[in-house]
Image (tube, grey):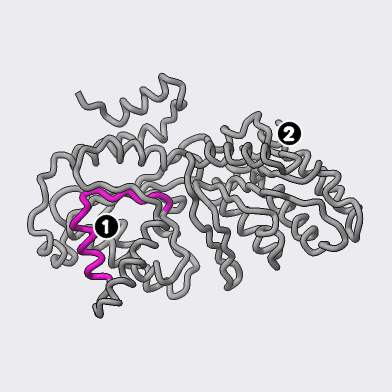
C-alpha cells in the first residue's frame, strides 16, 4: 500500500532523521492532497489545444507555491513529494538551473529563425512534463522576470502541475526590480493558479546542523578543505550550488555558489573585490550561513582586503549569521602588522566568539528576530 506524505514524514521522525514540526506536517498534508489529485487525473489529451487555451485553467491541480524562511525544510518536503508522486514525466530542478536551460533552448530556437523563441520552448517542456518541481525561486534578473510569467502560463495551460519553493511570498518576488510593474501579472497568476502555502516551521534546522560543530579550520590545508566540503554537503544536502545575485544600490553583486541559505566562496571573492558595507549588509540579509575558504595571513600590503574583511565580519556578527571558515592561522595571527592591526584585534575576538556555544544560541535567536521583523 502506498504511504501518504505525512506517513513518510512520521517514518523519518521515528528513525530520528527528523524532529516533529507542526509547520512541516501542515505542508505535507497539503502536498498529499495535491499528490492525490494529480495521480487521479487522467493523462492529458490535446496538448496543443491546451497551450492555445490562454487564461483557461485545465481540470485538475495547478500546483503549489511553498514559501518560508531558509532552513525550515521546504526543499526536503518538495523532494519527498516529488519522489512519492507516481506520474510519468516529472522533473525536480533548482529554479536557476531551470531558467538557464530555458535560455539555452531559446537561443537554439532563435538560431533556427523563430520569431517567438519562447513558444517552441514552452511547448517542448509541456510535452515532456506532468509535474515540474522548482526549488528556491528567486528572481533578480529582468530577463528572467519577463520570461517566467508567460512560461508558467503556458505550462499551467497545458496541464503541467508546478510546485515551487521560495524564501519569499509571491508579492516579494522581484521586489525592487527594474520595470517591476510588468512583473505584477505573474504574481497574480501564482495567486490564481497555485495554492500558496507558508511553511512556518519553528526552527532553522540548518543552524541546528552546526550546533556543537567545529566551524573554524586552521591551517587551510587539505584536511580543512575536506571538513569544509563535508559541512557544505550537510548544510545544503550536497547541492551543486547556483549563483546568488544581490541588487545593491543599482548594482548587482554575484557570489557564484549558493544553496539553501548557504553561500560559499574564497576569501578573495568576498574581500578582493571593491565591496563595501552596503554589499555585506545585503549579503547578511540574504543568507543564514557564510562559508569562507582560505583566509590568508594579511599585512600592510593588502590593507584594503583586510579592511573589507573587518567590515564583512562586523556585518555577519551584527546580523547573527553563522560563519564557517578555513584560514592560514588562528584569528589573532591573521593580521599582526600594518595600519589597523590594533583595531583588527576586535575582529579576531569576534571570530573567536562566533565559534562558541553562546554564539550558536545568539545566532538562532537572531534568525528568529529577523523573521519577525520581516513579517
Crowdedness near tag 2: few (<14), some (14–19) or many (≥20) residues, C-alpha within 10 Å: some
Q: Quadrant of the N terminus?
A: top left
Q: Are marks 1 and 2 in contact (CB under 8 Å)?
A: no
- Residue topped by disc 1: 192
Across and down, in percent, residue 126 comes to: 21, 58
Residue 30 visible, this angle = no
Residue 121 on the magenta span: yes
**Quadrant of the image occupied by residue 100:** bottom left
Magenta residues, as a range? 118-136
C-alpha distance separating marks 1 and 2: 47 Å
**Marks 1 and 2, the one that precedes in the sequence:** 1
Q: Which residue appears at 45% of the width and 68% of the height? A: 141
**Quadrant of the image occupied by residue 2:** top left
Q: Which residue appears at 85% of the width and 52% of the height? A: 335
Across and down, in percent, residue 40 comes to: 14, 39
Outermost residue, left side = 46
Q: Name the mark on residue 51.
A: none
Q: Nearer the viewer, mark 1 or mark 2?
A: 2
Q: Name the mark on residue 356.
A: 2
Outermost residue, top side = 14
Q: Which residue appears at 78% of the width and 55% of the height? A: 310
| Label 1: which secondary element | helix
Q: Viewer-proximal residue, 363 or 41?
A: 41
Amino acid at each position: 500500500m502506498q504511504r501518504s506524505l505525512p506517513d513518510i514524514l512520521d517514518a523519518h521522525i521515528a528513525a530520528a532523521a527528523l524532529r516533529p514540526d507542526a509547520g512541516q506536517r501542515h505542508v505535507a498534508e497539503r502536498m498529499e492532497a495535491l499528490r492525490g489529485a494529480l495521480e487521479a487525473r487522467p493523462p492529458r489529451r490535446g496538448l496543443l489545444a491546451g497551450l492555445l487555451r490562454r487564461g483557461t485553467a485545465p481540470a485538475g491541480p495547478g500546483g503549489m507555491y511553498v514559501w518560508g524562511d531558509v532552513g525550515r525544510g521546504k526543499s526536503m518536503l518538495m523532494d519527498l513529494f516529488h519522489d512519492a508522486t507516481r506520474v510519468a514525466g516529472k522533473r525536480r530542478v533548482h529554479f536557476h538551473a531551470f531558467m538557464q536551460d530555458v535560455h539555452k533552448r531559446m537561443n537554439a530556437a532563435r538560431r533556427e529563425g523563430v520569431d517567438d523563441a519562447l513558444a517552441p520552448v514552452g511547448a517542448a517542456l509541456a510535452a515532456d512534463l506532468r509535474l515540474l518541481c522548482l526549488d528556491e525561486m528567486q528572481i533578480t534578473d529582468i530577463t528572467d522576470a519577463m520570461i517566467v510569467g508567460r512560461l508558467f502560463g503556458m505550462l499551467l495551460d497545458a496541464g503541467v502541475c508546478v510546485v515551487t519553493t521560495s524564501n519569499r511570498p509571491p508579492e516579494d518576488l522581484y521586489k525592487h526590480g527594474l520595470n517591476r510593474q510588468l512583473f505584477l501579472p505573474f504574481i497574480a497568476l501564482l495567486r490564481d493558479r497555485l495554492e500558496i502555502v507558508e511553511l512556518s516551521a519553528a526552527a532553522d534546522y540548518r543552524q541546528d546542523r552546526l550546533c556543537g560543530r567545529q566551524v573554524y579550520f586552521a591551517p587551510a590545508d587539505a584536511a580543512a578543505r575536506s571538513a569544509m566540503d563535508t559541512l557544505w554537503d550537510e548544510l545544503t544536502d550536497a547541492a551543486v550550488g547556483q549563483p546568488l545575485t544581490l541588487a545593491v544600490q543599482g548594482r548587482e553583486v554575484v557570489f557564484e555558489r549558493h544553496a539553501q541559505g548557504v553561500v560559499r566562496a574564497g576569501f578573495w571573492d568576498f574581500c578582493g573585490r571593491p565591496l563595501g558595507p552596503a554589499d555585506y549588509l545585503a549579503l547578511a540579509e540574504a543568507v543564514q550561513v557564510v562559508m569562507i575558504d582560505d583566509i590568508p595571513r594579511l599585512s600592510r600590503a593588502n590593507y584594503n582586503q583586510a579592511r573589507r574583511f573587518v567590515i564583512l565580519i562586523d556585518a555577519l556578527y551584527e546580523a547573527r549569521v553563522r560563519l564557517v571558515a578555513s584560514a592560514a592561522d588562528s584569528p589573532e595571527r591573521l593580521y599582526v602588522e600594518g595600519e589597523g592591526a590594533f583595531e583588527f584585534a576586535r575582529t579576531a575576538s569576534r571570530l573567536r566568539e562566533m565559534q562558541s556555544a553562546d554564539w550558536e544560541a545568539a545566532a538562532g535567536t537572531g534568525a528568529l528576530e529577523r523573521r519577525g521583523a520581516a513579517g
